[in-house]
């Protein structure tokens, strides 16, 4: 199972498990990474290339994908999308806005969260839940990834930040799904997502088909 299996068919996913040595930024994007480290440059360039390939599959011509005030990708009119990257992996998801209201994807290394990070990204109820889940999966990392995917789906709908303490996650390990309930004013009472563990990666995806 990959990210493609976590989203409906209207969402196009393009994945990359490595970078192209010496690849240069797409024209118009260089200023976005002019001061970036080499690692950041590589993940940005591959992520944007993946996004353009996904757009091509939807019938869109290649264009620079700039960045908004919250570092979110700025998509062509009529498109919703999301980009993720971590060590050894980059991916992009796009869909036509007429088919999907919003999409968020995230990938993280399948490893335990540093203990000092856990209190800042989880709520007490979530820590209680994590304590009840079985072994074999780093559930704290999955919860972190789920919140990232929810935020990426949330922001285009609201234009507002959603903090780690402003959304409570519940995980259903039996069917590999999760639900996020925002604790602030929200266009939806909950955001639902799916997850998988592949190639030592935690992958999560949230798709909002429509908003009432």
Image (spheres, rainbow, N blue to C red):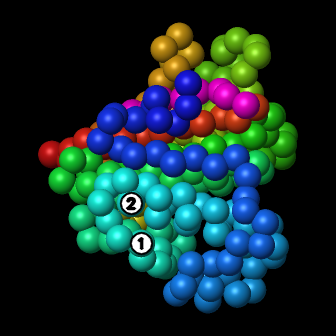
- The answer to whether residue 170 is visible is no
The answer to whether one can see residue 175 in this image is yes
Q: Is residue 8 left or right of residue 48?
A: left
Q: Which of marks 1 and 2 is nearer the N terminus?
A: 2
Residue at point 48% right, 24% down? 177
Residues under numbered marks 1 and 2 in contact, where contact means CB atoms less than 8 Å apart: yes
The local secondary structure at tag 1 comes to loop
CA distance for labels 1 and 2: 7 Å
Give the main secondary structure, helix, strand or loop, of the magenta stretch: strand
Q: Which residue is drawn at 47% across and 35% down?
A: 4
- Find residue 152 and report its horizontal and vertical position in percent: 46, 54
Q: How many marks?
A: 2
Query: Looking at the picture, how far across and down is residue 188, in whole percent?
Result: 28, 44
Image quadrant containing the C terminus: top left
Q: In this view, does 97 lie above or below 2?
A: below
Say if the magenta span includes residue 174. no
For disc 2, the marked residue is 56
* Residue lying at 64% horizontally and 49% vertically, measured from the top left: 16
Q: Which residues fall within the magenta stretch?
A: 191-199
Q: Residue 62 carries which label?
A: 1
Q: Which of 138 and 209 is in front in this view?
A: 209
């Amino acid at each position: 199972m990959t990210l493609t299996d976590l989203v409906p068919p209207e969402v196009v996913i393009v994945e990359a498990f490595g970078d192209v040595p010496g690849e240069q930024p797409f024209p118009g994007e260089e200023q976005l990474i002019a001061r970036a480290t080499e690692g950041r440059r590589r993940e940005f360039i591959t992520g944007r290339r993946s996004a353009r390939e996904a757009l091509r599959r939807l019938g869109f011509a290649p264009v620079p994908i700039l960045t908004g005030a919250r570092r979110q990708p700025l998509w062509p009119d009529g498109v919703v999308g999301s980009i993720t990257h971590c060590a050894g992996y980059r991916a992009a998801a796009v869909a036509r806005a007429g088919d999907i209201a919003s999409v968020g994807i995230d990938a993280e290394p399948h490893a335990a969260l540093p203990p000092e990070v856990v209190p800042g990204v989880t709520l007490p109820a979530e820590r209680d839940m994590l304590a009840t889940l079985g072994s074999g999966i780093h559930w704290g990392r999955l919860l972190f990834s789920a919140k990232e995917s929810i935020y990426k789906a949330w922001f285009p709908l609201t234009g507002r930040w959603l903090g780690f303490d402003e959304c409570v996650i519940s995980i259903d390990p039996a069917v590999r799904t999760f639900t996020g309930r925002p604790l602030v004013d929200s266009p939806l009472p909950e955001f639902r997502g799916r997850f998988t563990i592949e190639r030592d990666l935690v992958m999560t995806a949230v798709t909002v088909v429509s908003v009432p």
